[in-house]
Amino acid sequence: MDLRKDRRVQYTKKILREALFILLHENELSEITITELCKTADVNRNTFYRHYNIPLDILLEIEDDVFEKLSAVLRKSTNMDDVILLSCQLLESDKQMSKIVFTKADGSGILSRILRSVRSNFPVENQIELTAEAKPFAEMAYQFGEKGSIAVIKNWIENDFSIPAESIAQMISYLVNKLNKI
């Protein structure tokens, strides 16, 4: 019985997500009503409220799912270039989700969370020896690399993945590696 209930919950959440995706193509999140979302998903309001309070909750749940998937990539990899490549491939594998999260919801928060995890797994201090004078510069270079990587990924997604994931990953890896050598 629990498995069947879990399947129903999964199905309901899936159709609510799909309905949100459809509506986000035409409207901003703030313009989407629960009534409109329920009508598009063909569920009643009580069903919606059983899982969420507002449409934003669906988007936050999607962001958490993306974060978990990207974190799993990070846990599998021991090499920074592999992390970048696998992350780009993951984003490219679900284009619709990536577009919604990174264009409608400003997914830079997810990328920042991931990059903080990357930083803790690949500390700059372990890659190069830093003098006291170089530490502030290294911190600024890291911030530059982080924000630049986010901008490249968002631009790539906004331009409909016009460049293969492998090429984007190579570009980001090249820039990050150059920054690490400064």
Image (spheres, rainbow, N blue to C red):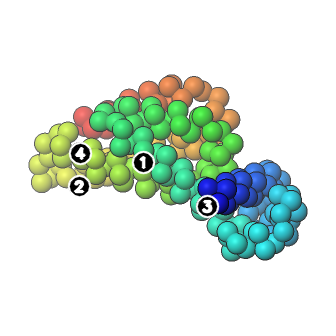
Q: Can residue 148 be seen at all in this image of the molecule?
A: no
Quick one: 163 or 131, which is closer to the camera? 163
Position of residue 105 measured from the top left corner of the image (x, y, whole percent): 63, 57
Q: Disc 3 marks which amino acid?
A: Asp
Q: Disc 4 marks which amino acid?
A: Val
Position of residue 2 measured from the top left corner of the image (x, y, whole percent): 61, 61
Q: Can residue 179 be seen at all in this image of the molecule?
A: yes
Q: Nearer the viewer, mark 2 or mark 3?
A: 3
- Of helix, strand and loop, which one carries label 1? helix
Q: Which residue is mark 1?
A: 71
CB contact under 8 Å: marks 1 and 3:
no
Q: CA distance from mark 1 to mark 3?
A: 28 Å
Q: Earlier in the sequence, mark 2 or mark 3?
A: 3
| Quadrant showing the N terminus | bottom right
Q: Nearer the viewer, mark 2 or mark 4?
A: 4
Category of crowding for the residue at label 4, using alpha-carbon neighbours closer than 10 angstroms: few (below 14), some (14–19), many (at least 20): some
Q: Earlier in the sequence, mark 1 or mark 3?
A: 3
